[in-house]
Each structure stands twice: as C-alpha cells, then as structure tokens.
Image: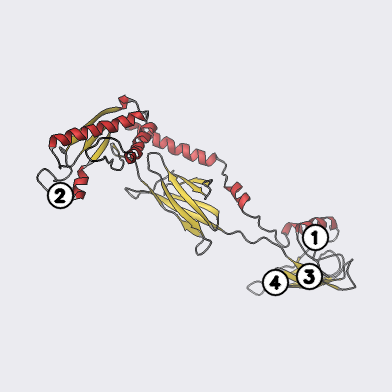
Amino acid sequence: MYFSSNGHLGLGLLDIFQAKIKEDGTVSSPENLGYPFNSKKDDFSFFISKNGKRGFFSSNREKGKGDDDIYSFFIYTDPPVCTQVVKGVIKNNKTNAPIDAAIIKLINKEKEIIAETISNNLGHYTFKDVPCNNTYTVTATKLDHRSGRSVVSTTGKGSNEVTANLKLTPLIIGNQIVIKPIYFDYDKSVIREDAEYELENIVTVMTNHPELVIKIESHTDSRGHRDYNRMLSDKRAKSTRDYILSRGIASNRIESAIGYGEDKPLNDCVDGKRCSEEEYQLNRRSYFYIVKGSESIEIRQEQEKKRVRKRIATKKSNFLEFLSKNLKKSGRSLRPENNKCFKGEEEDCDRINKEIKVNYRN
C-alpha cells in the first residue's frame, strides 16, 4: 500500500511511502519512494496502475501550474529477457554408460561457438541462460570416439529446459579399431569415397596414438570361387593399407594386410548353402587389430581428460560476451535499495533522477 506522511524521515513535508502487507496480515516498515516522487514540498495521493507501468500523484512542488498539481508518470523498463536451459546426458552408444570429460559446444545458426563445457562423471552437461526463439546445434566430441550432434530450438514455451541427449560411438573396443563396414564396388578393390571417410577414423586413432601398430584382415562371403575370393579380399586389404599409408601413417605401423576370403565365416553360410543377404553381409568385413602399443591408449585418454578439464576451466567463456551483444540489460528497479533519497541529499536525488525515466505531465 502507498500513503503520505510527515511522520517518517523524508525529503520534505508530506512524502509518499510504500509498505507491504504480508500474508499473516502484518505490515512491513514503510519505505520512502524517494526522488522524483518526493520533493521538498507536499507529495500525496499516489496511485499506480495494476500493471505497474503508469500512475499519478499530487504535489505542490515548485514549477507547478498552481498550488496542488496532479502529475502522471510512466515507468520504462526493458521486458524480461527470455532464456532457457539446454542440458543433456552424453552416453556410450555401445554400452549406454555415461561418458565424462566429453567436450560439448553450443553453436548458433551462424556456426559460431557461443558456449562450451564438458560432461561430468555422470555424463551430464548444462548450458544456462540460452536466449529463446533460436535454433542451436549441440555437438559432443571425445578422444577416440565418433562425434555426436543434435539440433535444438529454444521456443520459450513450456518447460524452462530443453534436453539434448547425445551418444558417442567408441572407435577402440578391446584390441580393435572399429569402424563401419568398408564397401567396394563389385569385383573391385579400389577404395571408394565412402570408404575413405570411414578409413579416416583409423588414421585419426593412429595419429592420436603414435605407438600403435595394427594388422588388417579382409573377409568375403561364400558366393563365388574360394580361391578367387581369397585373392580379391587380399587385394582389398592391401588397398586399405595403402590408403592409410597415403594419409601419412608410417609403413612400419601396419604389420600386415591379409585377405582371407571366405575361410573364416562368422556363421554357417558356407559353400553350398543359401543364406539371406543379411547373413552374407555379416561375413563381408574388415578388421583392424591392435598388435602393439595398446598399453598407451588408456594413459593418453586419461591425460586428455585432464587437459580438457584444465582448458575448459581456465578458458574465458565468450558466452557472456554473446549475451551482452544479443540481450538487453534488464531495467533498474523503480527504487533501488541503495539509492534512498532523504532530506539534505538533494545532489544524490539529482543523480538518481537521471537513472529513472519518468515523464511528467501537469
């Protein structure tokens, strides 16, 4: 409630005060509204609209039109900024276990990284104060894993949280570097463009771990002559090796590249038996076995975790800079607690007057 009184410390004669009625019916201590609502003269009959934007009060202050004049005022504040939280969990695509120390980036439509964080030991990550009504890409990366991404929109509607869970596929499982199947054209051993894309994962892992030495195995299904299949798969294994070497991997890091044809099936699809295409496909495969240097993998992965945590912790986030460029600063309160105006503090009142936008009309 608002009232005028000359019985409390104020700027002049009658001053306008505010007191809040609590839930239990008691009333808080009155607070002086300060300048510009109060002056050295009488200020009274305060009224403010329900939306808190416009009001009136009477005063006999100087420079009025008569004795007691009616003044109107408008309170200009920036609308509240709409933000949401983008959060999620990073998990292993094979085991569904949480992945810690994954690097998660929040990227806007202009492909600018506006925030970066890492997942905790439960795989959780959070981006706070993400502006509404925008579309973002969330990416997750980790050493020796395929990256993941998800597109999210902050609509400002419904829940205050937007969830983007991601799964990363490990490239090293046991004693193998595991990639998607490498496909060749019929009766050919030339590395196709889609196969090059997959083989880049082999190159990446071997670059990350220079101690590794691998061997390559290539297998076919049982269709066709056994000797021919063995010869074709051997050509494909060696073409695979040659591509990896062409990408800068030293030749002594590939121990062997051998094709076994149909000699080592994973099922009972052997000569003389008709099988489904899925069963045949299971036998057409390549293996990349780690034969040396595996003991360094876990050590380097732990070193990478520490490096990532340190980098993220010490890096000055550009998220605050992004917010400052894209969001309006929230408006000041009508009467800041530290800007009280009392009698004898007219100079301070003039300063506060510059900070509060009030439009007077007689």
Q: Which residue is mark 4?
A: 27
Q: Tell me whether circle 4 and circle 1 mark residues in contact (CB < 8 Å).
A: no
Residue 6 in view: no
> Looking at the image, is 276 positioned above or below residue 22?
above
User: What is the secondary structure assignment of the residue under circle 2?
Assistant: loop
Tell me the kind of residue under disc 3. Ser
Farthest residue toward the left? 272
Tell me the kind of residue under disc 1. Cys
Q: Which residue is mark 3?
A: 72
Tell me the kind of residue under disc 4. Val
Q: Tell me whether circle 3 and circle 1 mark residues in contact (CB < 8 Å).
A: no
C-alpha span from label 2 to label 4: 85 Å
C-alpha span from label 4 to label 3: 27 Å
- Residue at x-position 23% and y-position 41%: 186
Of residue 124 and residue 137, the one placed in the foreground of this image is 137
Q: Which residue is mark 2?
A: 275
C-alpha span from label 3 to label 1: 20 Å
